Image: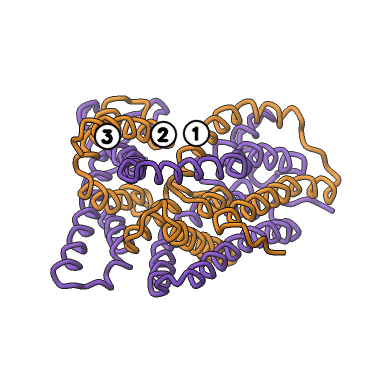
Amino acid sequence: MEFHVNHPILFVLVGIVVAVVLAQSVYFLVKAIRRAKEKGMDMTKIKKTIRSAAIFTVAPAVSIVIAVISLSQSLGIALPWLRLSVVGSLSYEAIAAANAASGMGKTLGEFAGNMDASSYITITIVMTLSIMVGIWLVPVLGKKIQGGLVSFEKKDAKWSGLLQNALFIGMISAFVGYVFCDLSRLWTSENGIFTNSKGESFTSTSGLVPVLVMVVSALIMAVCGLLMKKLKWKWLSDYALPISMVLGMVAALPLTSWLGGAIV
Amino acid sequence: MKNQNMTYMDSVHRDGRIWNLSVMVVLLAFPIVLCVLFGALPNWTGVIKGLIATAPMYWAVGVVETITYIPMLGAGGSYLSFVTGNISNLKLPCALNALENAEVKAQSEDGEIISTVAIAVSSIVTTLIIILGVILIVPLNPILSAPVIKPAFDQMLPALFGALGVVFVSKNIKLAAAPVALMLLAFVFVPALNAGTVGIMVPVGVVFTLIYARILYKKNWI
């Protein structure tokens, strides 16, 4: 069989893997819903969870499609489809693929349009083995860690609640900090232009864009919270997060044209 | 055969283990099947050099991420999230939002059910949207790659964490003040901290907040 990065058989094989992963999600969904019914949980809560999770997922999922498109230039469509449907994320996959290519003495761009089967398999193996840790480590550690948390809860409920909040706040604080990571361009730029170690140039004010986007989405979320509280608009709780996120993203368009971004 | 003595949580762990190990086998089979079908072998030097350059860091980060995220995702959510990926930018925010709206505790069985439902739905919707994207890649490419809309998707994380952050920070002002201030200063003044290293800073933020929370708790300040 003659190899091509977009050979139909690749789509069939990836389709099989994706179908297995989809089946796992459906299995766990059905299992959780059955348990909820069995223990007499309020099913409107479950329905609300399904609706709001589905709506919230759309924008991030579209950004994953964009990642598939950007990786497909050199790797074809099937492999990025697989890698970003199972475990992967754009930054990890792009680096893993580039490292595999450089292991063969080439850059990823040099493979565009003339990848042979051996190189493709090499890249696939490196990408797959590199990101596999969580898949097998959760079965090893999952029960122990969850069990530990449950016994914490029994021993000291107040500390257990605080611990859970501390975990969430710790994660959120890292991402809030990340939003400010390019702010220093304001005072480290020369003549209004910041150049990084890779030689890429940005406007000095470009680091303000993510900060202001965050402020916009936080304000919209706060307004949604007020509307829910004061006007009793309970229905808004399903949509508050996706609305705030998407409007924040939309605000990035005028903010970027005002404050600038990468200079090409 | 259903074991009557098995709790729901036990069965989640049993099924999760079976599913995750099965997915692992299927994933490893993919390159092997390619070798057979196309009659080709990998470039072993490329594999070894590629793995040396990639695996040590990814595996170290993978171990730390697994330990950090399992307590937040719940049992069912962990098995699913570590198979479908995109945890910090999609699955975990989705589960947090669902727990918040349903007003249930993460460690309760109701919390476990809500986070599993949210993460499963999110995984299904993501998979379906990617399939749609792959089918429509030719007409979609010029639209999604248009420079006009690129800034919006570049700013997805700030938009997501602005909305999520305001909810959690405002409800836990005392607990959040120090970690947010620390991360803010670190990301502003340490040049090595950027989009590529935020994943490594999550466990740092989590450990710092846990220690800080413990001190507040012991001193009865919270």
Instruction: Residue at 50% x, 65% y: name it.
Output: B125
First along the sequence among labels 2 and 3: 3
Instruction: Residue at 25% x, 55% y: name it.
Output: A217
Mark 3 is on which residue type?
Answer: Pro
- Chain label for disc 2: B
First along the sequence among labels 1 and 2: 1
Whether residue A180 sits left or right of residue A91 in the image: it is left
Q: Considering the numbered disc 3 on the image, is that residue within a helix, a strand or a loop?
A: helix
Instruction: Judge by depth and name the residue closer to the eye, A65 or A36.
Output: A36
Whether residue A192 sits left or right of residue B69 in the image: it is left
Query: Alpha-carbon neighbours of circle 1 within 10 Å: few (<14), some, or many (≥20)?
Result: some
Residue A142's quadrant in the figure?
top right
Query: Alpha-carbon neighbours of circle 2 within 10 Å: few (<14), some, or many (≥20)?
Result: many
Mark 2 is on which residue type?
Answer: Pro
Label drawn at residue B64? 1
- Chain label for disc 1: B
Vertical arrangement, residue A32 with respect to residue B195, above or below: below
Colour in which the image shows chain B: orange
